[in-house]
Image (cartoon, rainbow, N blue to C red):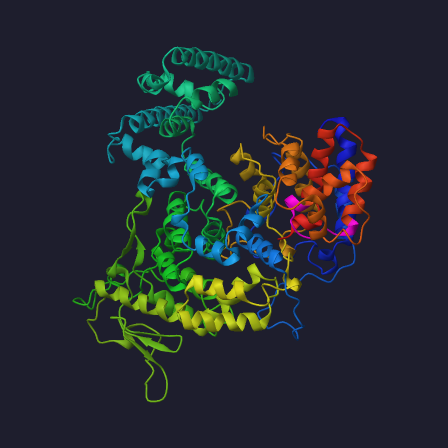
């Protein structure tokens, strides 16, 4: 940050720090230091900022001033019903639409509220959103064309971004070269670099064996080599630029493999040359170029594309309810994308499992996740083997056959109950965890390292009936509830429960399907899912009466998600002032809403992904099965606040990753909305409590608040913004930029 920007930024942080200190959010104990969560530091702790300026000592001190203010202690919401209910104050018709768009989109765009009111109201909007395939999404589709892996099968993703092992298999003839010319060119470069790496390793090994120093270039030699490579890459690029655009990729893949490797290697082409060349390629050609540039083991590139696609979907999609619910359900059925082959499976998991079923029914969604290779790999169920299974050496025809030492992996069985269905207080025991793990043996993946699909291998399945969660489930899926007149089995599972010679069959998968059906239709699951929906869409500590009603709706509708959402949205609690704009935005929600509220087209989604990472929420990289906690205490800390304020300042001053920002256009948009400034001021609740706007800055502030926030802004916030603007005179554009930044950083914009 330049010196002349330091003082305004420090004052900006101090202003917002004080505004937060007096805001209702802080009074209710919602903005405070985060509490420890069952999440790894690597996945959850904000990393050093890559795209945001480093917060200086004054900024940290200012932000800590707010954090140190007295507030009620942070605590995890409990599953118990909330205290004695108080009388609810209903929202007016406009506020109801604001509430709906705040909770079921990634933030309304300028004019969205008026559009909904003018075209049938909340019910019409909801009905349209419930059929997302009928909503054109042209702007998003155009942008997603730059990320071809998002539409690929897992096998195709592996072939575009293979790991070192897959490349070696091709080199050794175990896997054929691709027949596609583009992919073939990629693999030639991959194998060329693999041979270089192997030669270097052999040279190092020979030096060690001969007790000689390792052959290594000096820094000067490395710099000279890099300069030579840059010159060679520039020469080759010049040859390509001399050709018509449509001929350039064909010419590139016809180059000797050594030239291709030099041209595409990261750092060899200067940024402008590289960007100009990439801009002339089709999305598929661009994918091939990037694959040639990527280091070996670069499957992470597909995760990066997935994250960028998600940010674009958050901001640009017309199918907002589906996007919100897909994010909610992915977090509920979390997988950690960098784990093993999930680096390839996660894209199809998000697309074909989560988003496809985000608005269907919970039982259908539960089954889809259970038979997903991504979930099987993430929670290691594909490694689980029944102790008495054929795969463990048990041979019914040979009682003396030597049994192996393989056994159950309980990870999925435990999380399936604790996190996915009945909840930690769902009444199960450790014996139930073990029994469910036995029930789910054989559920796995066909050739996980090659992108195969789900497969049930009966040879790995633990044979015989199981006693679990108050039921007896036979191999064929027949369920008997334990109770009077029903004799329990001798054991939860194992040879004591069946006759000698019993083996699993392909039909044994029905045992797991029966268990999933029991879980999906359990009253405990109905309560747990209802609680989580109410917690995310209504309040961190949701009203017990609402949760109870949703539980009944779940059971009556067999977990139909649309029916549940209709009941929640129609509830008195959802439409009450007590629960209006009381949910703190996660980093993903904050970033997406900042772009939507200012009608800004995201020019650099990769930089947005990095920013969300730095704010502590790396997309698809929550390591624990809990996913990310979605309550306020996790996201409001001094460092989190500084990051958000810095981002707002950088964005509105066009200093964020070459992103252009147009505050005058935003102001003009606000002025042309159906509500005139006087009406907007009345909407914001300031007309009767504050004097009329006496300056252009005050009028602009009110218009921008109405346009970007769309709900009451506190008198304290307005007073402090006015004071700040008086102390920082500047050109009209500079004034509008800073004013917009102040609103983005205000307490009111941190909530939805």
**Res 618 quadrant in image:** top right
* Residue 416 appears anywhere in the view: yes
Can residue 41 be seen here? Answer: no
Q: Name the residue at the bottom extreme.
A: 485
- Residue 69: which quarter of the image? bottom right
**Residue drawn at (74%, 36%), measured in percent from left and top?**
56
Q: Taking 253 as reference, is 364 above or below it?
A: below
Quadrant location of the N terminus in the rendered image: top right
Residue 321 position (above or below residue 12): below
Taking depth in this image into account, of 468 and 454 the one nearest to the observer is 454
Image mark count: 0
Magenta-span inclusion, residue 707: yes
Position of 10 relative to 319 (above/below): above
Q: Percent from the top left, x then y, of residue 603?
A: 53, 32
Q: Residue at x 28, y 32 (%)?
A: 170
Q: Residue at x 35, y 34 (%)?
A: 160
The single residue placed furthest to the left in the displayed view is 397
Residue 200, given in percent of the width and then of the height, sits at 41, 24
The residue positioned 45% from the left and 56% from the top of the image is 127
Q: Nearer the viewer, residue 654 or 610?
A: 654
Q: Nearer the viewer, residue 4 or 414?
A: 4
Q: Position of residue 280 (x, y in %)?
A: 41, 21
Bounds of the magenta span?
Answer: 706-716
- Magenta stretch holds residue 111: no
Q: Nearer the viewer, residue 303 or 144?
A: 144
Judge left or right: residue 595 versus residue 508.
Answer: right
* Residue 291 in the image, given as x and y percentages of width and height: 39, 29
Does residue 392 appear left or right of residue 599 in this picture? left
């Amino acid at each position: 940050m330049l010196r002349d920007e330091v003082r305004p930024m420090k004052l900006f942080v101090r202003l917002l720090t004080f505004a937060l200190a007096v805001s209702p959010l802080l009074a209710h104990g919602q903005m405070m230091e985060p509490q420890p969560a069952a999440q790894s530091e690597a996945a959850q702790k904000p990393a050093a900022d890559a795209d945001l300026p480093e917060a200086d000592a004054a900024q940290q001190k200012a932000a800590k001033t707010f954090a140190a203010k007295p507030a009620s202690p942070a605590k995890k919401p409990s599953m118990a019903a909330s205290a004695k209910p108080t009388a609810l104050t209903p929202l007016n018709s406009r506020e109801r639409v604001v509430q709906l768009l705040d909770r079921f989109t990634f933030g309304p765009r300028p004019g969205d509220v008026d559009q909904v009111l003018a075209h049938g109201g909340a019910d019409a909007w909801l009905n349209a959103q419930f059929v997302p395939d009928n909503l054109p999404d042209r702007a998003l589709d155009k942008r997603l064309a730059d990320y071809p892996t998002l539409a690929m099968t897992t096998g195709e993703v592996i072939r575009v971004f293979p790991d070192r092992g897959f490349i070696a298999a091709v080199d050794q003839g175990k896997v054929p070269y691709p027949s596609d010319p583009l992919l073939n060119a990629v693999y030639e470069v991959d194998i060329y670099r693999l041979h270089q790496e192997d030669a270097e390793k052999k040279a190092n090994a020979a030096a060690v064996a001969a007790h000689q120093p390792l052959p290594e270039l000096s820094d000067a030699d490395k710099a000279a080599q890099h300069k030579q490579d840059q010159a060679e890459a520039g020469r080759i690029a010049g040859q390509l630029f001399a050709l018509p655009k449509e001929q350039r990729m064909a010419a590139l893949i016809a180059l000797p493999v050594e030239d291709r490797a030099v041209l595409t290697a990261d750092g060899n082409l200067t940024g402008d040359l590289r960007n100009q060349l990439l801009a002339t390629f089709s999305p598929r050609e661009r994918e091939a170029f990037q694959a040639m540039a990527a280091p070996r083991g670069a499957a992470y590139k597909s995760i990066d594309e997935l994250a960028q696609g998600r940010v674009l979907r958050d901001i640009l999609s017309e199918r907002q309810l589906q996007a919100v619910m897909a994010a909610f359900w992915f977090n509920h059925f979390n997988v950690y994308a960098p784990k093993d082959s999930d680096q390839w499976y996660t894209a199809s998991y998000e697309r074909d499992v989560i988003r496809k079923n985000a608005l269907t029914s919970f039982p259908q969604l539960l089954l889809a996740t259970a038979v997903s290779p991504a979930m099987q790999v993430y929670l290691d169920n594909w490694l689980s083997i029944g102790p008495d299974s054929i795969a463990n050496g048990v041979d019914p025809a040979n009682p003396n056959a030597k049994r192996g030492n393989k056994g159950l992996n309980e990870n999925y069985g435990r999380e399936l109950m604790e996190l996915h269905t009945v909840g930690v207080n769902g009444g199960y025991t450790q014996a139930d965890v073990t029994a469910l793990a036995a029930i789910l043996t054989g559920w796995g993946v066909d050739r996980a390292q090659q992108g195969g699909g789900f497969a049930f291998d009966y040879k790995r399945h633990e044979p015989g009936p199981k006693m679990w969660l108050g039921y007896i489930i036979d191999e064929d899926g027949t369920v008997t509830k334990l109770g009077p007149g029903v004799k329990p089995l001798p054991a939860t599972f194992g040879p004591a429960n069946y006759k000698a010679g019993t083996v699993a069959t392909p039909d044994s998968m029905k045992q797991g399907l029966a268990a999933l059906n029991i879980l999906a239709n359990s009253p405990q699951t109905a309560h747990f899912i209802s609680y989580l929906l109410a917690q995310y869409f209504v309040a961190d500590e949701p009203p017990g009466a609402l949760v109870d009603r949703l539980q009944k709706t779940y059971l009556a509708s067999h977990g139909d998600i649309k029916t549940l959402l209709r009941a929640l949205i129609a509830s008195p609690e959802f439409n009450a002032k007590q629960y209006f704009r009381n949910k703190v935005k996660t980093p993903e929600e904050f970033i997406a809403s900042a772009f939507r509220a200012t009608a800004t087209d995201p020019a650099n989604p990769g930089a947005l992904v990095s920013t969300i990472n730095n704010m502590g929420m790396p997309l698809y990289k929550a390591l624990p099965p809990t996913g990310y906690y979605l309550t306020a205490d996790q996201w409001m800390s001094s460092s989190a606040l500084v990051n958000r304020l810095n981002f707002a300042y950088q964005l509105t001053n066009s200093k964020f990753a070459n992103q252009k920002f147009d505050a005058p256009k935003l102001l003009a948009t606000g002025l042309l909305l159906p509500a005139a400034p006087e009406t907007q001021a009345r909407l914001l609740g300031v007309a009767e409590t504050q004097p009329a706007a006496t300056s252009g800055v005050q009028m602009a502030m009110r218009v921008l608040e109405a346009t970007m926030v769309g709900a009451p802004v506190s008198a304290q916030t307005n007073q402090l913004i006015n004071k700040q603007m008086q102390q920082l005179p500047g050109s009209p554009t500079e004034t509008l930029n800073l004013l917009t930044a102040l609103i983005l950083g205000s307490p009111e914009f941190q909530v939805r």
